[in-house]
Amino acid sequence: MFIGEYQHSIDPKKRLAVPSKFRDELKNKVVVTRGLDKCLFIYPMSIWKSLAEKLGAMPVGEASTRSFVRLMLAGACDIEVDKQGRILIPDYLKDYANLKRNIVVAGLYNRLEIWDEKKWNDYKRKAEKNTDEIAEQLGKLGIY
């Protein structure tokens, strides 16, 4: 399970050191894809295979479904984790998430999210302002 928030940086060779806490679960290969809210998602191969099957089975008749499947599958890239626990982020994904040098790796149960640090802090501030409203909606769903 992935949880927590970690500040890291992308080195001049476009490599990101995955937090050591997560390396055992990720093993030696991951899938990185375009995420929502202009971040990147990183999945362990086992989780990705299950998700990709579900995405591949979605109906293609609706434009929004096609767009989401394209975003996730066409944007995906399988990446080796090197012996130092680093991954090389392709330029098209780095550009999509507008990643500069300083980034945040956020653990979200079955995936990691990679955010530009400034964008993460802005997003987090906005979300923190709405915690009462979010909790109320979750309560209505019986989750919180």
Image: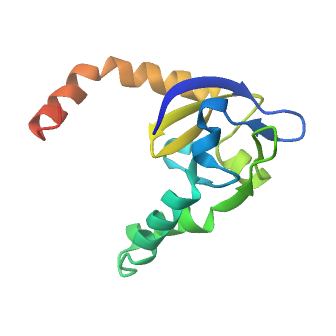
In this rendering, would 14 be left or right of 50? right
Task: Point out the residue furthest to the front here.
Answer: 24
Along the viewing direction, whichever of 47 and 133 lies nearer the viewer: 47
Along the viewing direction, whichever of 133 and 104 lies nearer the viewer: 104
Q: x, y percentage for residue 63?
A: 40, 73
Q: In the picture shown, does residue 67 fall above or below 1? A: below
Q: Which residue corresponds to the image point at 49% horizontal and 47% vertical from the top-left?
A: 36
In this rendering, would 115 be left or right of 93? left
Could one spot residue 42 in this view of the protein?
A: yes
Picture quarter containing residue 78? bottom right
Could one spot residue 40 in this view of the protein?
A: no
Q: x, y percentage for residue 135?
A: 20, 27
Task: Point out the residue furthest to the right here.
Answer: 12
Along the viewing direction, whichever of 109 and 57 lies nearer the viewer: 109
Q: Which residue corresponds to the image point at 89% horizontal and 40% vertical from the top-left?
A: 13
Total number of numbered labels? 0
Q: Is the image coloured rainbow, by chain, by secondary structure, or in one colour? A: rainbow
Q: In the picture shown, does residue 139 fall above or below 28? A: above
Q: Quadrant of the C terminus?
A: top left
In this rendering, would 93 be left or right of 67? right
Q: Quadrant of the N terminus?
A: top left
Q: Which residue corresponds to the image point at 58% horizontal and 59% vertical from the top-left?
A: 45
Q: Which residue corresponds to the image point at 40% horizontal and 80% vertical from the top-left?
A: 60
Q: In the picture shown, does residue 55 fall above or below 96? A: below
Q: x, y percentage for residue 140?
A: 10, 37
Picture quarter containing residue 113? top right
